[in-house]
Image (cartoon, grey):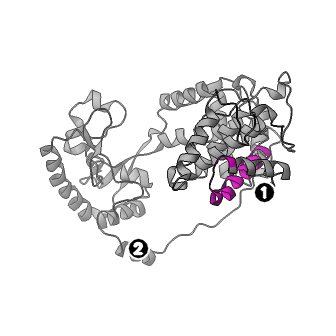
Amino acid sequence: MLSIPSSLQEQFAVCLRNKKVPNRAHASYKKWLRFYLDFCLKYHFTPNQKESFTHFLGKLHEKKQTKSDQQQASHAISLYYELIQPTEPLCDIPPPPKADLPGKMVKASTSASAASTDPTNTTNCVGTTRKTYPQPSSPLTVSVNINEPSARTNASWKAEYAGLEDEIKLRHYSPKTLKTYRHWMRKFQTFTKSKPPELLSPADVKGFLTFLAVKKNVSASTQNQAFNALLFFFRHVLHKEFGKVEGVVRAKRKPYIPVVLSREEIEEILAYLVPPYDLVVKLLYGCGLRLVECLNLRIHCLNFDAGIVTVHGKGKKVRTVPLPETILLDLRAQVNSLKDLHQRDLDRKYAGVFLMDALEKKYPNAAREFIWQWLFPAKSLTLVPGTGEYCRSYLHLKFPDF
């Protein structure tokens, strides 16, 4: 971890005292500053660039830091920017929540923060005019010539993110695919320091993939996932030919032997499950279904006469799978129990189940028909924002009700 220069530590400590930051929080504020400087060094940002602060907050969100920690980090970095750029504050960043500043310290810190963002205030956190602040001697501070091609960074990718979402929806890809591709697009943007999209080239992709393999030590499957996401981004969003990306350091794919549970172990697991979760596991094990495929089953997917189940899988692919005879009675009991639930929902005049794509507009009554109900419905109805209607979804992936 990078250490803060002693001169900067002294200035920052004085700033914290004059801003009435509680003494017990000084160590945390210095920690966030150290993390920020280390982030800039690691991802090749200069600490006096505002855009690096945005990426740093994104990194905190990615690391699932609490909101109070993110606000405290924001306040700490804003004070640092007052030191290095006293005439141009970073942005109006609020201090940490009041719970972190007990007693009279709350009012003092709040007023001090308001004074720091007031454009008419000419007094800095040390008590002198802002113009008297010297630029701290930090080894990370680098002068950049904006006319150099390497300085063409910090561009807005807002249109590209919107284009990615449009292209994903156009091809009817799953929301998980959109989430994954957006994740790698954000990582790639950070790596290139928000380079203008029109200047991106396969060389940038090569450097990013090499960075993942060498610096991040990601697995081969993770690197391939990033490659596919960037390939989609170049072809369908930037409308560029990706070309051959040669000379990339590839992560090694390690051979492994999968762990397969025995029949006795499966039966022991099922003994601890209660309906309908035991039936979900039996379908996964007996029919070879993915978890999402199983939870997306509807009543009309079951064909008891033929002994098969119709599965709607990834990529809009449909297949039929034989039903194990040992679970046919359990499946019939599950369907019969859903009739009572469906009738109660109809009595409460609910809007029906969620349907895919535009089926709800094409068949307005389908959402309330029994054959379209979920085989494994959620325990409670879902309020649809904007409409005020209640619909029923399928059982949550993580089984929150279990």
Q: Amino acid at mark 2?
A: Ile
What residue is disc 2 on?
269
Left or right of 225? Residue 352 is left
Residue 47's image quarter? Answer: top right
Is 356 magenta? The answer is no
Residue at x-position 63% and y-position 60%: 24
**Farthest residue, direction left:** 347
Give how far across and how far down residue 364 sits, in percent: 23, 30
Which label sits in the foreground, 1 or 2? 1
Label 1: state its secondary structure. Answer: loop
Left or right of 152? Residue 263 is left
Label 2: state its secondary structure. Answer: helix
Over which residues does the magenta segment extend? 18-41
Residue 390's image quarter? Answer: top left
Crowdedness near tag 2: few (<14), some (14–19) or many (≥20) residues, C-alpha within 10 Å: few
Residue 155 visible in this rendered orientation of the protein: yes
What residue is disc 1 on?
1
Residue 228 visible in this rendered orientation of the protein: no
Q: Amino acid at mark 1?
A: Met
> Chief secondary structure of the magenta span?
helix
